Image (cartoon, rainbow, N blue to C red):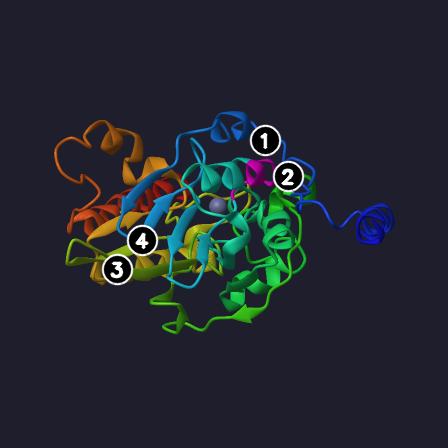
Amino acid sequence: MIRLFAVFLCCVLFAGCGPRQLEPDTPSDCNRCEDWNKPVEPFRVHGNTWYVGTNGLSAILVETGEGLVLLDGALPQSAERIVENIRKLGFDPLQIKYILLSHAHYDHAGGINALQSYARAKVAVSEGNAIVLRTGMLQEDDPQFAHGPERTTFPAAKVDTVIGDGETLIVGEVGFTAVYTPGHTPGSTTWTWESCALGECQDVVYADSLTAVAAPGFSYGASGAAERLTASAARIAELDCDILLSPHPFFFGMHDKLERRDEGNPFINSLACTFYAEQALGWLEQRLDAER
Ligand SMILES: [Zn+2]
């Protein structure tokens, strides 16, 4: 009886005895946000790697043997969907140990604050991403900076670990290597790790966006961002790459590939990173033509 009363008192005083709740941040408002945030069924990509994102924004879950690692948090309003998807796969979202980031824009970093607080996870990002994630505000060197704070600000999150270029973060049995691929943003990061299934191991590449998207007034040619993007595309093309994933499902043909799942695993394609880089260089060429 005394114990029951103590539990009751604890819950009344601290509201901390019940299951931990996700506390979503204010949703981002953008033209494509509603479509991007439509729910999709989570699925296993390969071995330890799962897709837990939404229709238009990736979130990737990796089971490490000692907890979970989440790559990207999509929009603020995606956090609940991501948690729901993780549960649907039979995992406990409170087991997320680390959250990693591709690039610090509202549509990939927006959900991180809520997910980090909920899971009490650590956040590990590149130097350039750390500066932006800690404030939720773009720096002047971001191609989209001139869109202004109303369109670009997102919930700031705590950065626990800054990962250098080429460094590997080891969680359980999995090593996540950060490859700096600036261009789309100054902090853009591509992550690679290994996934094994049925005795065969594959190199997974979560290649960051290589699109030359900018606010009016920004010049990819004059700012040097075009050279950075070109070098980053070359780096991605040279990576050991069996499975390509990226922050927008559209970039790696996710929806098409899901339709072809009966023909083996359509996500395994050792040419995918090369094609991804070539496609990006084509888009950059178009952008530079338009700037001239
Ligand atoms: Zn972006």
Mark 1 or mark 3, whichever is nearer to me: 1
- Left or right? Give the position of 121 relative to 62: right
What secondary structure do most residues of the magenta stretch adopt?
Answer: helix
Stretch in magenta: 74-80
Which mark is on residue 209? none
Whether residue 200 is visible, yes or no, is yes
| Residue placed under numbered mark 1 in the picture | 30
Q: Are marks 4 and 2 in contact (CB under 8 Å)?
A: no
Report how far apart the C-alphas of labels 2 and 1 lie in the structure.
Answer: 8 Å
| Residue placed under numbered mark 4 in the picture | 48
| Residue placed under numbered mark 2 in the picture | 151
Amino acid at pointer 3: Ala
Q: Nearer the viewer, residue 151 or 82?
A: 82
For mark 2, give the secondary structure.
helix
Residue 254 position by quadrant? top left
Amino acid at pointer 4: Asn
